[in-house]
Amino acid sequence: MQKEEVSNIVRILLIQHFDIHPDVFSWEKTLEELQADFKILSYLLFLEQLLQKQFGTKVGVLEVISTAFHTPQDVVDLILREV
């Protein structure tokens, strides 16, 4: 799977499932900057479940992503290492 395709999927998932408006979406902002509710662990868990379902593989978001420091681009890079 190519980076552009993974990036598009991650962007769509974040916008559709986490109430992030397309106009404020940024690859450089942390997940918490995009959606303050990412401070709640269940948001990160839900993201991991969505990614695993979408890509059909284990994506260890909980183990390596800190929503206060990591960006959507970091999530894309993680997925690319896993698939």
Image (spheres, rainbow, N blue to C red):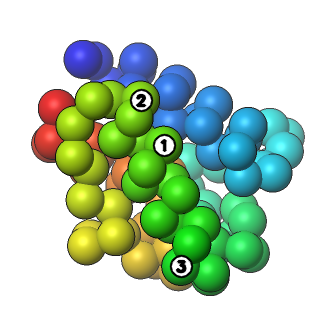
* Residue at 50 percent of width and 66 percent of height: 44
User: What x and y, as percent, mark residue 11?
Assistant: 59, 36
Give above or below for 14 relative to 44: above
User: What x and y, as percent, mark residue 37?
Assistant: 72, 74
User: What x and y, as percent, mark residue 47?
Assistant: 51, 54
Q: What residue sits right under mark 3 in the picture?
A: 41
Quadrant placement of the N terminus: top left
Task: Give the numbered dot on residue 39.
Answer: none
Q: Is disc 2 in contact with disc 3, using a CB cutoff of under 8 Å?
A: no
**Dot 3: element:** helix
Neighbours of disc 3 within 10 Å: few (<14), some (14-19), many (20+): few
Task: Give the numbered dot on residue 54.
Answer: 2
* Residue at 73 percent of width and 37 percent of height: 16
Quadrant placement of the C terminus: top left
Side of 11 where 35 appears, left or right? right
Q: What residue sits right under mark 1 in the picture?
A: 50
* Residue at 28 percent of width and 30 percent of height: 56
